[in-house]
Image: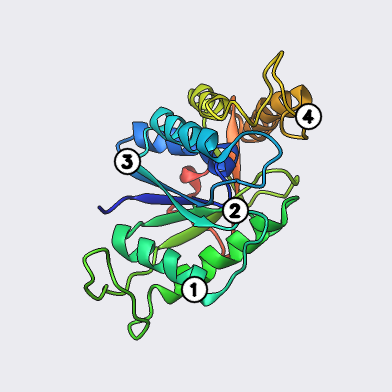
Amino acid sequence: MQVDILAFGAHPDDIELGCGGTLAKHVALGHTVGLVDLTRGEMGSRGTVLERDAEAVKAAQILGATFRVNLDLPDGRLVNDFESQQRVIELVRTHRPRVVLCNAPKDRHPDHGVASAMVVEACFRAGLHKWESLGDDGQPQAPFRPEHVYHYIQFYDLQADFTVDISGYVEAKMASLAAHASQFYQANTDGPETVISSKWFWDSLTARTAEWGRVMGVEHAEGFLAARRIGVDSLFALR
């Protein structure tokens, strides 16, 4: 199934944190979106694997994603090797997205940087005619390279290369995050407190989108990094 946007995250909830509003907006605009979690988040301090699987499904439904898959790579021990890249290559060639979104090259969790490099390199190799891969039907896949690979921003306060207006979709973003109930702030819940389960972290999420929005003159926005120079058709296309 071909999709317009294929979003990758090292862990369940990475995608929602970094670009949930952007994805919800593009679905509303008629674009198709697929989600890929590289790991099941089994090393997380809170929640079981089964709980996190169910939460991920619910969050994908809230965002309107066409599908969500998990590659079941090892959480906390991600390695950017050819075997892992091959799994990504197969997905990219199967779903042929115009745009790929993935983790930032550098972030608080070491897996995020590894995932970023893995996806970027796999997207390049997916376009090589002599790089072999097989689809689910066992047949050789045709080469395909996405037009764009962008990085969403999570924990570190990185300087965005561009921002996307998500005014009207921040509620969908926060609802998709709330679906990951084992991970984020909820009053009177059990389990060890972590950075992302704290109330201050939860409140900071909309504070950040509001700040990005303020700078571009809208209510809320999400920031992205781009490896190459961004171009527009005209000066009037800029916000």
Residue at image mark 1: 83
Q: Nearer the viewer, residue 229 or 45?
A: 45
Nearest to viewer (mark 2 / mark 4): 4
Residue at image mark 4: 193
Mark positioned earlier in the residue sequence (1 or 2): 1
Q: Secondary structure at mark 3?
A: loop
Q: Residue at x 64, y 46 (%)?
A: 153
Picture quadrant of residue 220? top right
Residue at image mark 3: 66
* Mark 4, other Cα within 10 Å: few <14 / some 14–19 / many ≥20: some
Amino acid type of the residue that numbered disc 4 sits on in the rendered structure: Glu
Q: Residue at x 34, y 80 (%)?
A: 132
Q: Residue at x 52, y 26 (%)?
A: 179
Give the CA distance from mark 3 to mark 1. Answer: 26 Å
Residue at image mark 2: 103
Among all residues in the image, which is located at the extreme bottom?
Answer: 130
Q: Nearer the viewer, residue 27 or 63?
A: 63
